[in-house]
Amino acid sequence: MFGVNVFYRKISDLQEVVNTGAFSDEALGNYEDAIDDGATPSEAAEELTSFVFSADNVGDGKVYGIEFDLSTPLDFIGLPNTGVFVNYSLLDSKVRDEFGSRRFNSQAKYVLNAGFIQDLPEVGAAFGATYRKQGRAFGRVVGEEVTTTYGADLEIFLEKRFGDRYVVRLTGSNLLNGKKREAFNKFNTIDDQRGRDFDEYELESEKAGPVFQIVARATF
């Protein structure tokens, strides 16, 4: 099976997380502490660096892309009990904010899933693997812009059937020690953000180890 799906969708009143412009309780507390310590209002204003975020309608947008699907057994090369699959999606979108046009916040540029399944009917077992990868994502609100990149994920499984009712499945996921990296651009005002006058630049990185799971399943 091979398929191609092209899609285009208009969205009214797109909801996203936005910066309300109100300072957070922490920022206001730090501001008051600075005043109590003898700082001038302009000096204490340096503590006003965090804001309240909330969900809100950001206007009308559109999302579009193309998706490719392939799923096939490998009989034609002498592997009748082997199947492979690939799904690849290219995604794009558009919405306008205070700074102009951009993609939807945190939307990956592409998503890839690929893998295989090998059946072993003579021993009542099967095994396979799935590889997943998604592209870079970007998000922008007032005061902050975030670029996120993701590492790949590899999952494998081994499954054994016992009679017609029982199955034991061992799964190992995140075998590539997936990472997520985020780059934050932070600004104090809208004018600073337009003029690229940075208040702070921050890098964050997260890494997770493999996860193994065994599941027994019975049908009645």
Image (cartoon, rainbow, N blue to C red):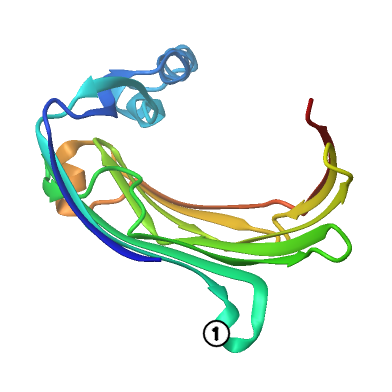
The residue lying at 78 percent from left, 51 percent from top is 171
Quarter that holds the N terminus: bottom left
Q: Quadrant of residue 216?
A: top right
Q: Quadrant of residue 59?
A: top left
Query: Horizontal placement of 189 versus 79: left or right?
Result: left
Q: How many marks?
A: 1
The residue lying at 71 percent from left, 51 percent from top is 208
Q: x and y percent of residue 23 in the render?
A: 33, 19
Query: Horizontal placement of 138 versus 215: left or right?
Result: left
> Front-most of 200 and 165?
165
- Residue 176 shows in the view: no
Q: x and y percent of residue 96 in the render?
A: 10, 41
Tell me the kind of residue under disc 1: Phe
- Residue 217 shows in the view: yes
Q: Secondary structure at mark 1?
A: helix
> Front-most of 180 and 42?
180
The residue lying at 85 percent from left, 57 percent from top is 124
> Front-most of 13 and 148?
13
Q: x and y percent of residue 76 in the render?
A: 55, 84
Query: Horizontal placement of 4 versus 160: left or right?
Result: left
Which residue is tagged 1? 76
Q: Quadrant of residue 73?
A: bottom right
